[in-house]
Image (cartoon, coloured by chain):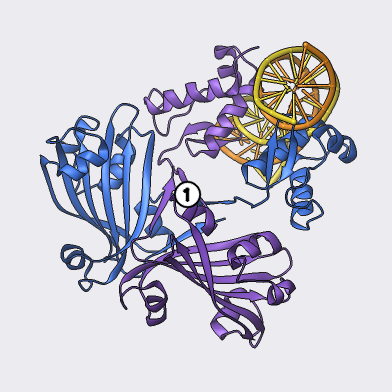
Chain colours: A purple, B blue, C yellow, D orange
DNA sequence: AATTATTTGTGCGTATGTATC
DNA sequence: GGATACATACGCACAAATAAT
């Protein structure tokens, strides 16, 4: 067979990284590259499309393909399924249910999820442990409409994180990390000092029809968020 | 014309999200779907390949295509080019060079970049501002071998971030965020209190042949890292 | 403002490659 | 080894976007 699109991809990437194709410069069009390299235009298209998705190239019909000026490369991160995160560290995962109750959501939470003020939801607080040491403290609100089973599921046996992954519909969500001083409650559960800097992950997820859950996850001090380019 | 691959993609995603195709279940093969939906197999392939890249499906030759059990969805983040980050907030970007000097790297830095102990590098410290308020403090080491021009470039006119994006080769890198207490120096430059929780981004980049740069970027208090799913 | 030419985007049918059950 | 399902190369045609006129 002829060249694979991966071959074309590698060759083009080499030319970009070696600056044979300068940032901002127009590269030959697909037809020409296909002729030069000895493959079909569809193969070149596949390779260049991949490079564009990776952020190396910018493509526009009629305008042609340019090497990206500022490589808007994207970092990717696996969305944390906490068990996997802990097991990837070679540690034993466990979790502890602190409490669960169905009650009125505070206004800022119902607002954030786009639910009417005064909506009831299931409020779950739990602790995730790695080798029996506190790893993260979770404060979560779950919409009863979107996930009716939540009130009766055995959250002492399966973590809210995992139960929801398996049982809740999901279509989109938001993720936001910040650095804050540990609150009194967070410090107590995480076994650290009040005011110590900790990473907080705030996450909301929405199903196809309704908001599903809002979560605040506070990591124990020293947590690192690694991203892969 | 027939259906587009986006149509097939949307239809399949709907079936996954509605659990018509259950997590873990095998879905019909490409040929069958093509026949049912009235399009070419290549079109189905394009759609299912996209869904697999997005983490909804798992595909294996001969074994077929399954709905992912734990949707290992990935969050993506644009790698921060600080000017763009600030301008996206509707603020004016500027930067201030604090100092620059070519000197021996501390051992932990040369180790981290895989350079021999006692290597010289260009050490640059600078401040990025949004609407003339401190946004982030940068402490950076640049490998003179990989980027010889660094010593003579006008870092008071163009920020190290931007100069390197335009002038340094790049092939891969690491990114790591953490929450720490602001050091004395960081607090002084960022105009905050010693010990306040701040986000720190540590980043290393490597070119095709040699390490390029190691950077520690300390954001002003209150910085949020948003990721998109 | 409308038209044209160019370039990428994509669908189709076919053929073959390749991993893996 | 054989059968199966995905992976993908090819050549063609046409669609869509848009720069240039």
Please give the count of numbered marks on the rendered protein. 1
Residue B155 percent coordinates (x, y): 20, 46
Q: Give the residue number, with chain letter if any, for mark 1.
A: A88
Compare residues A68 and A183 and report the one nearer the observer.
A183
Q: Quadrant of the C terminus of chain A?
A: top left
Which residue sits at x=64%, y=21%?
Answer: A41
Residue B146 percent coordinates (x, y): 25, 31
Which residue sits at x=48%, y=32%?
Answer: A66
> For residue B93, which quarter of the picture?
bottom left
In the image, is residue B82 above or below residue B112? below
Which residue sits at x=32%, y=39%?
Answer: B205
State whether residue A63 appears in this view. Answer: no
Q: Is residue D14 left or right of residue A52?
A: right
In the image, is residue B138 above or below residue B222? above
State whether residue A166 appears in this view. Answer: yes
In the image, is residue A112 above or below residue B95? below
Q: Is residue B98 left or right of residue A204?
A: left
- Label 1 Cα crowd, 10 Å radius (few <14 / some 14-19 / many 20+): few
Which residue sits at x=39%, y=28%?
Answer: A17
Q: Is residue B108 left or right of residue A167?
A: left
């Amino acid at each position: 067979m002829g060249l694979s699109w991966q071959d074309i991809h590698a060759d083009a990437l080499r030319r970009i990284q070696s600056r044979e194709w300068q940032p901002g410069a127009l590269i030959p069009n697909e037809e020409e590259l296909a002729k030069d390299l000895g493959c079909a235009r569809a193969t070149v298209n596949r390779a260049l499309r991949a490079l564009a998705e990776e952020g190396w190239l910018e493509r526009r019909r009629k305008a042609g393909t340019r090497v990206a000026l500022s490589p808007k490369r994207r970092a990717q991160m696996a969305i944390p399924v906490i068990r996997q995160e802990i097991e990837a560290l070679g540690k034993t995962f466990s979790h502890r249910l602190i409490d669960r109750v169905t009650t009125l959501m505070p206004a800022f939470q119902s607002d954030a999820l786009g639910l009417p003020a005064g909506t009831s939801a299931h409020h779950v607080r739990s602790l995730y442990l790695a080798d029996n040491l506190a790893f993260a403290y979770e404060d979560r609100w779950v919409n009863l409409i979107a996930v009716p089973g939540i009130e009766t599921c055995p959250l002492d046996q399966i973590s809210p994180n995992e139960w929801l992954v398996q049982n809740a519909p999901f279509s989109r969500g938001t993720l936001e990390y910040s650095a804050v001083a540990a609150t009194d409650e967070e410090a107590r559960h995480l076994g650290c000092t009040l005011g110590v800097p900790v990473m907080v992950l705030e996450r909301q997820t929405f199903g196809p029809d309704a908001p599903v859950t809002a979560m605040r996850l506070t990591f124990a001090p020293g947590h690192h968020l690694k991203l892969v380019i």
